[in-house]
Image: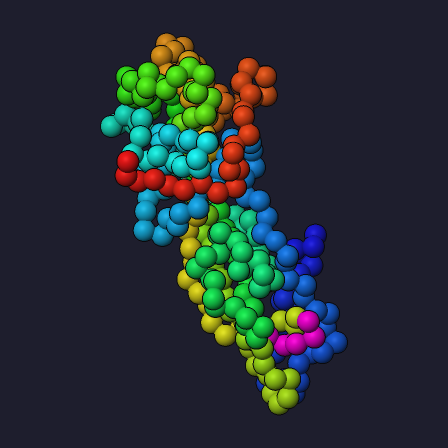
Amino acid sequence: MKSMLKLMIMSMLFCFGCDDVPGNLPDIIPASQLPVFTKHVNEIEIADSFNNADPTMVLGAIVERTNGLVHSFDNFLKEDAQAERKSISEIAFREFLENSVVAEAEWLTFLKGKVNDSTRAEVTVTEISNASIGISSINKDKLQAFAQTVPNEKRDDYGVVIAYRDFVINASFFKEQSIEGNMTGYGAKIGGKWFGKHEGLSADHKVIAVWSPLPFVIDNVGSGDRTIRAMPLTVLTDKAINDGKIHIKPLDRPKQFKLQINP
């Protein structure tokens, strides 16, 4: 409701050849934090930008919860693995942001140094696609060979990426303008000052990875059950979590993980 109200206010702030800024309009209050885009305990934000990378590279990769790395070079997909991909267009967030949030948020590194007291940023985060894999896409021999290198008591420290959610971040800059004279264009009133749209900035590209515990994947990868082999691993993992058959250990670094492309 709060976001809808802000969007309604924003839609009112179009001024074509007006004599002055509509000063009676209420201020827009910039958001003081970004939302958390992870939905479940077995989801992680990958800190790296995917502007120039195909997010499918993370599918089948190892997650190491003790050091915050996603090892894309330890990939356990079969060569003929089929990922179920879905294109969507869902706005997850659209707000003006406090400049302190822009300065501190890992997701907004591409904006740092570009905002100040006279420049504000409106940020839109859109989920554009998602993808998942099934047990039949996992290379059993390769996964089990990796597992043999990990002591049994350490296997809970590892997971396998079984899905991802793909996000694009767009930003527009708004500069403070004098309220004297004619005002034109799209803008917003913030802190009693008028900010007019200055320029749009092309987006960054981020990924949320969904992972399943290594022991759970190992237990199921050799299954001959056609039902299990036909299900997405996300469904199998969620069911096991809900049934209490597996317990997801909280990640040591729950918000940001780094992608390691080479050993």
Image quarter of residue 95: bottom right
Q: In the orientation shown, which residue stands out farthest toward the left? A: 79
Q: Return the residue nearer the eye: 110 or 138.
A: 110
Residue 148 in picture, x, y percent from top left: 33, 16
Please name whichever residue, 215 or 174, is drawn nearer the observer in this view of the structure: 215
52 sits left or right of 183 in the view: left
231 horizontally vs 190: left or right: left
x and y percentages locating residue 217 in the rendered image: 41, 19
* Residue depicted at 64% across the width and 62% down the height: 30
The overriding secondary structure of the stretch rendered in magenta is strand
Outermost residue toward the bottom in this view: 181
- Residue range of the region highlighted in magenta in the rendering: 191-196
* Residue 194: in magenta span: yes
Please state which of residues 65 and 25 is positioned toward the viewer in this rendering.
65
Using the image as rendered, state which of residue 10 and residue 157 is in the foreground. 157
Colour scheme in use: rainbow
Quadrant where the C terminus sits is: top left
Identity of the residue drawn at 48% across and 43% down? 256
Above/below status of 75 relative to 24: above
Q: How many marks?
A: 0
Q: Position of residue 246 (x, y in %)?
A: 53, 18
Say if residue 233 shows up in the picture. no
Is 22 part of what is drawn in magenta? Answer: no
Residue 249 coordinates in the image, percent (x, y) = 54, 26
Q: Can I make out residue 179 in this image?
A: yes
Give the vertical position of 195 relative to 53 (above or below): below
Single out the residue that lies furthest toward the right: 24
Residue for point 44% across, 37% down: 68
Q: Quadrant of residue 259?
A: top left
Tell me what residue is drawn at x 73 percent, y 70 percent: 26
